[in-house]
Amino acid sequence: MTVFDNLASTLLGSLPSISVLVLATLAVTLIFKTSYTTNFAQGVISAVGSYLVMELMLFYRVPMYIGILAGITAGILIGLFIDIVIFRNGRYVNAIGKQIITMGMVSLLVGVIPFVFKTAGLEAVYLMPMVALNKYVVLSKNIAIQINSLVYFGISAVIVTVVFLLLNLSKWGLGVRSTASNEQVAGMLGINTYVITAASWAIAGALGAVSATMYAGFNMMSNSLFMTTIQVNAFLACILGGFATFYGPVLGAVIIPLISALIGFTAIYIPTLSTWREVLVYVVLLLLILWKPQGLFGPRAVRKV
């Protein structure tokens, strides 16, 4: 294989990771922009949806599309429960208080998952993929891509496109953008910010369930925290792209897997780098964030003298 073939194969191999991380990052961004807090429970909420999908498929022989709808419903209900039942009924719940509550939800859901789902007791399992793993699309003599990768990327692209269309063209999107700009002013202008935040938590829960189900299609589900790495990378993508916009974190979610893929490509010719691949990815991200603390796609800071 030529250098070009190796590079193309490596970059194409990152499509599943990009698809999963983009959805997870968009979920984190929606919650941060409307609730002004980081949801540390996003990964575990997502895991609940994927475990429900696997439970229905493996033990009750439910078709995957029905299982995914059930997983999405579970994610929506958990998101609504956190926002409507917990946040709104808590006393003096500020941004930090919300973060602490989501940390508590992590402990709760980590304990609930193995208690409720039989599949969580298995040592290490994969969720059945949507398409057979051994099916490929041949692009050239030395380059082929799994059909699964194309399916995941297509699903992610469609979902992200729909969400951004809603953000820019719908009444809900106007409310989200207004709430993200200034919640108090948005409320004074007649926008029901409670509905906006509830809808954002619901959509984030749905996005998480889809991303976790896709991730389980090519990665091992070993315990309730199997989505932790994705959640951490989603936070990093938000910082890398910049929280000031909705599209910045999504682009950051595309960049991180590409950086990992490029380091993996280099490791083909310098094998010792494979051991340090993950470390090198975070070093590169740290340098990029130090270079542009406001995010690669955030507004340029203007200092008035």
Image: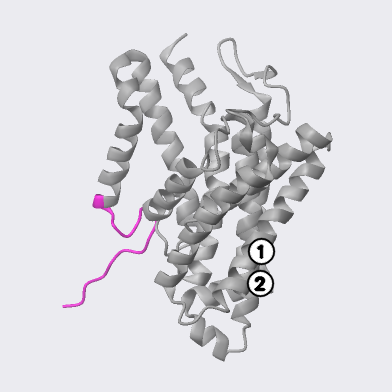
At x 65%, y 66%, the residue is 80
256 versus 58 height, above or below: below
Q: In this view, does 152 lie above or below 109?
A: above
Query: Residue under circle 2?
Result: 172
x 53%, y 59%: residue: 105
294 within the magenta span: yes
From the viewer's perspective, is 16 left or right of 283?
right
Q: Tell me if label 2 and label 1 are in contact, CB under 8 Å.
A: yes
Q: Which residues, given as a range, are shown in magenta? A: 290-305
- In the image, residue 31 lies at what x, y percent? 53, 64
Using residue 189 as the reference point, say whether residue 100 is left or right of it: left
For this rendering, which residue is in front, 55 or 230?
A: 55
Residue at the image position 64 percent from the left and 23 percent from the top: 146
Q: Is mark 2 on a helix, strand or loop?
A: helix
Residue 281: in sight, yes or no?
yes
Prevailing SS of the magenta stretch = loop
The foreground one among 134 and 71 is 71
Query: Which numbered circle lies on residue 166?
Result: 1
- Between discs 2 and 1, the one toward the N terminus: 1
